[in-house]
Image: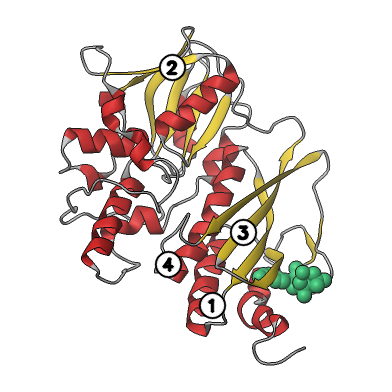
Amino acid sequence: MAGPDSEFDLIQRYFDAPAAALAPGAGVRLGIGDDAALLALRDNHELVVSVDTLVEGTHFFPDHPAASLGHKALASNLSDLAAMGAEPLGALLSLTLPRVDHDWLAAFSQGFLDLAGAAAVPLVGGDTTRGPLAVSVTVLGQVPAGQALRRAGARPGDRLVVSGALGGAAFGLAHETRRRAAGTAAVDKEPACERLFWPRVRLELGRMLRKRARAVIDISDGLLADLGHLCAASGCGARIDWPAVPLDPLLAQAPPAQAEAAALGGGEDYELLFALPPGESLDLLAFGVDAPLTVIGECTEAAGVVVVDAAGQPLDVARAGHDHFAGGEAHEVEPMPTGQGTDVKAKD
Ligand code: ADP
Ligand code: MG
């Protein structure tokens, strides 16, 4: 069937833009349109693969702006490639749609393809089915054999470094939650929700970390949770110096407890957290990337993660209430004050 709203027509209309299917220079031998795509790996490279699914009501609100959803679905997956030090090869998009809504599809595909174009990630295929709204993206990347960055590998004495600033997505989520309670419509270009709706991806930094960092993870579930994963995989502990943690400018006016909750516990910032061995120069690394890099603590012999204040006293991180923020935007969160006059960009 090839009617106006057939699967074939929708793919052609929204996803098979030549620019999306074949970015110049990419290793795509065959993109959308056949039974499968064909990609060429460079010599002596390994394939890096990851998939993430977003389900309406679980991972995003039903009125989540469609363009932002397209962007986020790809961004969260690319962030996993970044955290492995991989260079993207292509993406697959599996869409489950309750109905054909052309306005929604136009906005969604634009959000997805704009990021795909900016990050030079060709959309090489996918699947389109009917059912409750869900978006699943698979990303494919490559990395020189043996050089993939993993969560394991950090050692006591390594500095813990984070890119960008933290807590902006949690701030946006709290703002969104209040907006919904008030019953007003979502605005997808609102500064308060910029970090939540338009996360940036640290692909270039990830590649720069190859052969430099000992362990890397992307902060999708919150700093403490993801640091916990890195420490568990590496078999070490960590100390975080709270005053060193770079806070998103949106949190400048937030009460300390809420800033802590957002920066330590808030998910979806998609920054990279890595362990840098003593011999590696942070200045040299920082010189080569367009992301701010901040040392926020170090890996320790003693198991467990502690967060200390300026006097070296342990902070009560339970106060950070990171459970409130863990696990995606459909969870309940405490409202935080709106940022006034903030000026944050989706990409830097
Ligand atoms: P098949 O029945 O062989 O799986 P499909 O009709 O599902 O083929 O898909 C036809 C082509 O369109 C394939 O190349 C597939 O990868 C691509 N495709 C399907 N849905 C999407 C989508 N949402 N985005 C991008 N490509 C898609
Ligand atoms: Mg199919």
Foreground pick, 145 / 267: 267
Residue under circle 4?
A: 62
Q: State the colouring used for the structure image.
A: secondary structure
Residue for point 72% across, 82% down = 8
Q: Earlier in the sequence, mark 2 or mark 4?
A: 4
Q: What separation in Å lies between label 4 and label 1 (alpha carbons)? A: 14 Å
Residue kind at label 2, given as amino acid type: Ala
Within 10 Å of disc 1 (Cα), the crowding (few <14, some 14-19, many 20+) is some
Q: What separation in Å lies between label 2 and label 3 (alpha carbons)? A: 34 Å
Residue 19 appears left or right of 54: right
Q: Nearer the viewer, mark 3 or mark 4?
A: 4
Residue for point 31% across, 57% down = 193
Residue kind at label 3, given as amino acid type: Ser
Q: Nearer the viewer, mark 2 or mark 3?
A: 3
Q: Position of residue 127 (x, y in %)?
A: 71, 68
Residue kind at label 4, given as amino acid type: Pro
Residue under circle 2?
A: 238
Mark 2 and mark 3 in contact? Answer it, CB < 8 Å.
no
Within 10 Å of disc 4 (Cα), the crowding (few <14, some 14-19, many 20+) is few
Q: Earlier in the sequence, mark 3 or mark 4?
A: 4
Foreground pick, 262 / 199: 262
Residue kind at label 1, given as amino acid type: Leu
